[in-house]
Image: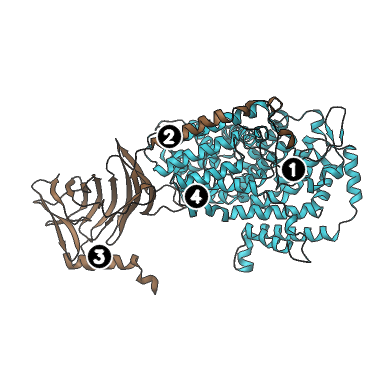
Amino acid sequence: MGPTMTEERTKARPAPAPPITEVDGNGHDQQSIAEILDVSKHKLSSVRTKTLTPTERWMQYLGFPLGILVFLGLSYMPTPAGLTVAAQTVLACFALALVWWITEPFPPYLTSICLLVLLVFRDVQPMEKVLGVLGMDVIWLNIMAFVLCSILLKTNLAKRLSLHLIVRFGKSALPLLFAFMVIQLGLAPLIPATAARTIMTLPFMLVAAAIYGSTVARPNKFGKNLFQLNLFGISIFSSGFMTGSTCNIIAVAFLLTMGNTKVYYTDWMFAALPVAIIAMLAAWLIGPLFVFPLRGAQTKPVLTGGITEVAGALKEMGPMSWEEKKGAIIFLMVVFLWCTDRWQMGWFGFEIDEAMAAMIGVVLTFLPRYGVLKWNEADIPWHLLIFSCGAYAGGLALQDTGAARWAVGSLFDALHIGKDVNFWVVYVAVVTIAAYSHYLLTSKTMRTIILIPFIIGIAQQFGFTPLSLALPAAFTLCWVIGLPISAKPNVILFSTGQYTVLDNLKYGFIVTTIAVITLIIAGFTWFRFLGITP
Amino acid sequence: MRQYLSARMILPVCALAASILFLGAPSEAVEIASLTEKITVDSSGAAKVEMTVMIAKAEPGTLLIPSSFKTAENLKIDGLPDATVALVEKEGIRAFAITAKEPPSGKQAIKLSFVAPGFYDWKGEKLADFGNRSMQYRFMNTLPAKVQSYKLDLMLPAGFVVNTVDDSQPKLTSKSPAPPYQIIRNGDQYGITIKASKLGVGDYSMVRIRFKDGSKSMAFLFASLALGGFYLVGFRDTVRPPDSSPAKPGDGNK
């Protein structure tokens, strides 16, 4: 094609690589802690290139025509009953984008822009609606999240707290990953907003990843494990508590109003939390051992002096500086607003949305003289925000045109559930469809509204108790881990550039499958003991 | 005060007032268990209409069924022995007046069929972007007899497809577990079905769709395939390892 093709044969990756200082006996890069924690070298906002493996090159080469074939196949087939032409077209456009996001013939942000263009020119949605996604709260929250994250990184507060965590648990990778899981488990009942939990822990993930050699410039398997395990922890532990997410509360309300069954906080927790913990323990073991295996030196910090240097660096930091204290005050104020949302109506007469709470923090952050950051110091990965916009626009179009609803309904119809069907056949089908439906429906609330009344209806139709089917299905509502666009935490963590769409698809699918199997086994055993299933 | 003057309030009041003029005092003695309208639009703009009515309660005399149609050609009635039917209008309220020796029982399905000329104005309706056209149908119960269940099947001429559903009554909201309407297909004909229940006097059910020619562009198909082909040819060096790329003159100056 041209002399620049070798350069084009790359994937979008943020930031230039830091200089390598030493190579250890095993051939692994060893860097000083000062270099590793120099955040100016790991900017999320710049795009860098990466040499591809032969498999990735073939995927990239074949991905473009494959995407077009999938698009044409879905567009040109006769419109099925139940589907408008706009819904059929959005399915085709989204499938094309999904193939391109996975195979990456274009960088993800360019595929997203292509999707936006297609949605308008293929007559799916009007331009105003498609472009309006950039103004959505999730995108604003994403921007504000990266500013807040920059506060902790710039003031060295993230470094201080992460070094504490590493000194305590970070001698090797598995205990450190476990420590992050425990943190997410602890935060889940306290802060219902999953995005808030993500933003709170993101700076620590970034520093911990850097100490294990996974930077935005050179993401490694530790980073893939760390960021995705945190994502799974944030989502799956939310299912362990009735207050873990709004969708859980909506599901409980449906059970009460349509199924005449009251579910108490402890009923939910005793049933769901063990399932969530088992699924997460499996994810913690399977990721670092099989999916993205960490071997030898990959399980240790990439430091010339090992963990003792981390301890030394922590000691060198001395007491907290005034800048750190200011950063901590702003951050804690935002966390306070996130944690107290349920009481704010009584205090202020209105409720502060999580994006607005973050925005208040950002106002204080940029205040001249008293703030802690200047605009240029805020590290905002715009290319990945554009990716999120395209993905969200696609997801919303799937929802608005009824395509997602049709696809979920078609799955249930395909089961041909008859009158004399065995309860366990229905149970397995219901929890499986409920869990995997997050690949189609990007809104947890919408998924709850579509699925739970439908499942209560199925239970009533076949003479089962609504609780036996709808409650286990409700436990899966928060398991939104399969795609970078499945929920706000997914968008935020993907924006770090530490893993690809394919990585997320692979690990997310495996963990979803493990969680579904755990839920099915729980249905036969634990839920029976609790009186949920017959 | 303004909310009391909204269309939602005014329409039933007007309908009730008109129906009182039409019939005298509202009667509770007539109740329609179900009313189904199947409207098939043809390419001339005329619509073939099949209406099926199940009566829950009736009284001797003329039975009135609400109508949204101004004209009904070739109007026929079936399912009720020795019955006659006519489209009548008084004070802007239209209804099918059915006269029979015996009042219909709940088990009898009364079937009306007719042709409504000029149902869709092909020339008058402006063609929108991407070849879209708009079509709306509204059924309002203008009579005191309550319609317990209402169903509409609106079928487009062969070759046309429903692109989007712009509005409906009952409405689809973010809290609706299932939409009140569904896209249907009968052979090569596409259409939409919508259901409503408990339509009292002044209550209505409606649907507004955008539809267009269902034929697919062959030019777009071949252009897309050609684009894929060009990529395979033009980007074939993508699969070559980076170090085996042939050096081009001037590369060293980059």
Q: Within 10 angstroms of label 3, few (less than 14), some, or many (20 or more) residues? A: many
Q: Within 10 angstroms of label 1, few (less than 14), some, or many (20 or more) residues? A: many
Q: Is residue A167 above or below residue A137?
A: above
Do labels 4 and 2 touch, CB within 8 Å?
no
Left or right: where does residue A323 sit relative to residue B93?
A: right
**Type of the residue with mark 4:** Phe
Left or right: where does residue A484 sit relative to residue A460?
A: right
List x then y, in percent, for residue A409.
44, 39
> Which numbered disc flags the more N-terminal residue, 3 or 2?
3
Label 1, on which residue? A180
The quarter in which the N terminus of chain A is drawn is top right
Label 2, on which residue? B221
Q: Distance between the Cα atoms at labels 1 and 4?
A: 34 Å
Left or right: where does residue B128 sit relative to residue A239?
A: left
State whether discs 3 and 2 lie on one chain.
yes
Q: Distance between the Cα atoms at labels 3 and 4?
A: 37 Å
State whether discs 1 and 3 lie on one chain.
no
Do labels 3 and 4 touch, CB within 8 Å?
no
